[in-house]
Image (tube, grey):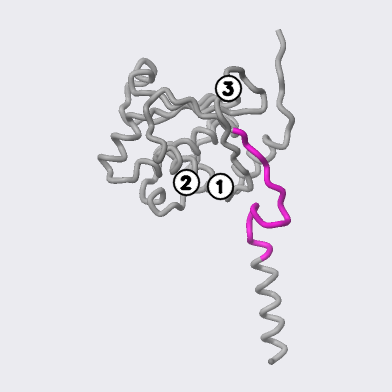
Amino acid sequence: MDSRVRVWQKGLLVVVLMCGGASDAGAEFRTLTVAVAHYAAVDPQTMREAKRIASEVYRRAGIDIQWVELSTYEDATRFYVNVLSKEMAAPFFSSEETVGFAVPGSRAANVIYGRIREIAGRRHVAFGLLLGYVIAHELGHLLLPAHSHSSYGLMRASMDLKLAEAKKLRFTPDQVALMRERLAMPPVVSTH
C-alpha cells in the first residue's frame, strides 16, 4: 500500500474521532432524571414512543434520560413532565398552536396532549413522534437560560415538522454545552 494512502487513512480516522460528538467514549454522559405526570389519557404505546424519541435527542447531546415513576414527594434531583389536557391549559393560552410551556430554572415542563394530538392528525405526523419532540423541547427550557429559542434545531419557537419526521431535530452545540454544564452542578435546595 502506498504511504500516502496510509497517512490519509490515519488522518481520516483522527477526523472521525474528533467529530464524533458527546456520546463517544471520551465524553462522560450526564443524567437527567424525569418523572411524567399523566393528567391526560395518553395510551402507553404512544408514551413509550414519545419517551424513546426524547431519550434519543438527549442521548445525542451526551445526556441520558432516566425515566422514573412519579412519587408523592418532590425530589430536588428530578425533573417533571406534566401531560396536560387541553382544558387544563386553556386558561393560560389563547393560541391553538401552543403545545407546551416551561419556566426556565423550574423543574416542571408542561405539554398539552390534546393540541399535540390535533396538530399531529392535521399535519399527518406520528403522534408519539411529535409528543416526544415537544417533551424534549420543553425539558430543554428547564436546562437552558431564559429566552433560549434558537433560529434552527429543536429549540426553534415553531417546530420544523419535516425535520421531526426525518428524526433530525437536535440541540445546537452551544445548547448541549449549557445543558451538560447545568446537569454537572449539584441541585440547589432552598429553605425559607
Q: Which residues are magenta?
A: 17-33
Q: Main secondary structure of the magenta part?
A: loop
Residue 67: x percent and y percent? 57, 36
Can residue 154 be seen by looking at this rendering? yes
Around disc 3, counting alpha carbons within 10 Å, would you say few (fewer than 14), some (14 to 19), or many (20 or more)? few
Task: Indicate the position of residue 60 as horizontal and vertical percent values.
Answer: 58, 50
Q: Is 34 a magenta residue?
A: no
In depth, the one of 167 and 64 nearer the eye is: 64
Whichever of labels 3 and 2 marks the residue nearer the N terminus, that label is 3
Q: How many marks?
A: 3
Which image quadrant for residue 148?
top right
Residue 186 occupies quadrant: top right
Callout 2 amino acid:
Tyr
- Check residue 152 in the rendering and tell me which mark sits there, or answer none: 2
According to the picture, the residue beneath numbered tag 1 turns out to be 172
Asked if 28 appears above or below 51 in the picture, the reply is below
